Image (spheres, grey):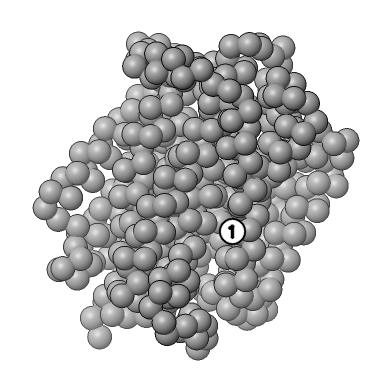
Amino acid sequence: MRPAEKRYSTKPAVDWWHRVTRASPLRFIAVWAPGLLVMLADTDAGNVVTAAAAGAQWRYHLLPLLFLLIPMLYMIQELTVRLGIFTMRGHGELIREFFGRGWAWLSVAGLAAATIGSLITEFTGIAGIGELYSLPRSFTLSLSSAVLLLMVATGSYRRIERTALIIGLFELAFFVVAYAAQPDLASVLRDAVHIPLGNRRFLYLAAAIVGAVFNPWMVFYQQSAVVEKRLKPRDIAAERWDTAFGAILTQLLTAAVLVAAAATLGTRFTPTSLDSVGDIIVSLSRVLGGGAAQAVFSAGVLGAAMVAAIVSSLALAWGVGEVSGYRRSLEYHPFRARWFFGVYAACIIGSAVSVRWVSDLVWLNIAAQVLNAFLLPLVVGFLAALAIKTLPEANRLRGWYLGAVIGVSSVVCALGIIGGISGFF
């Protein structure tokens, strides 16, 4: 059997996907979710904090960057779709098989660093929202952890996917907040054409934006989800649309937060304190109309944080399993895949406990995004190498598209690294 045709030897004999429907239109719709879900997770609490800080400090100057990153975001995640569908392996397993265990564990180490950083930002966001409504951290962290653990313990990928998508829809509240902020179009256009590239603080936030958009766990999650869902080559068009729609949506959601912050915190109101998610929400709601705006924005941040916590933790559990070889499927009972569910639970519980004593600082959230920017070259490098080496000839990364992926990625990686380094001087 050729490597590209080999399937997981540890996959249970449950193929719910092929029982969904045999009708093409319904199948096209039912294929959607891995791309959209991973993109909704990308608009997480850390992304919200970074976008709000960018808008408050630099108004609309960083808005064009968000839209310019859409093509690269799609290209990277589309490669995970190809690799998942045509190899039926997760990202970590492919690296282990074609480049060896050393490189595979290196990729998982980067994944672990990104996942821990993301989880800390998610739980600090959840705790900050709870404190807005006079709920102690111990309560909100315990409750959110219990919900996240119970969701995965159900033993059904489809159920988790649907539940996470429903939770993620609360992020649409960001559009409502942006509309209520009533941004001035002339100011948006004026700031969009004036990019202060010579300012180190601006470059540092630009690096944070890059890192907020490109999380290593997105690559691991979507490729493993495609394998878990048992998508076939005939599904690739639908999954590409799923990914493209998600890439546009997540950047629009992030842009909505930046616009709301720029139109309020960056112009009409200068907050005395902007140290936490709670401070950002209070500052925005104070300008946008008080309690109603606070509730809407809080719901959006809470939904984003919960979805990102699910996706990033599952990505790490899948990634470690793909490299080490333990059972790694949500279709298993937790006691039949103890290591898989154990890694997921350790991520959730460990991060929640850590946040119990960690201050909810904006700079910590932004630093976690800058870390992702430094990890981006490693992620893109492995993806491109695998797409060249492991895919069938007809679906291999090559020609002008290969040049486009390398060229665009090189520019974005350079921006992330240079901007990140500038923050230390």
Q: To which quarter of the image does residue 343 belong?
A: bottom right
Please identify the quadrant where the N terminus is shown.
bottom left
Q: Is residue 275 left or right of residue 356?
A: left
246 versus 29 height, above or below: above
Please identify the quadrant where the C terminus is shown.
top left
126 versus 105 height, above or below: above
Q: Which residue is mark 1?
A: 165
At 37% from the left and 58% from the top, the residue drawn is 241
At 68% from the left and 36% from the top, the residue drawn is 297
Q: Is residue 104 left or right of residue 60?
A: left
At 73% from the left and 32% from the top, the residue drawn is 293
| Residue 291, horizontal then vertical, whole percent | 80, 31
Give the residue at the far bottom of this rendering: 13
Q: Nearer the viewer, residue 163 or 172?
A: 172
Q: Is residue 147 left or right of residue 374?
A: right
- Is residue 70 visible in this depiction of the protein? yes
Q: To which quarter of the image does residue 230 belong?
A: bottom left
Q: Nearer the viewer, residue 204 or 76?
A: 76
- Is residue 337 visible in this depiction of the protein? no
Type of amino acid at the residue the image marks with label 1: Leu
* Label 1 element class: helix
| Residue 174, horizontal then vertical, whole percent | 60, 37
310 versus 124 height, above or below: below
| Residue 54, horizontal then vertical, whole percent | 52, 23
| Residue 234, horizontal then vertical, whole percent | 31, 75
Mark 1 neighbour class, 10 Å CA radius: few under 14, some 14 to 19, many 20 or more: many
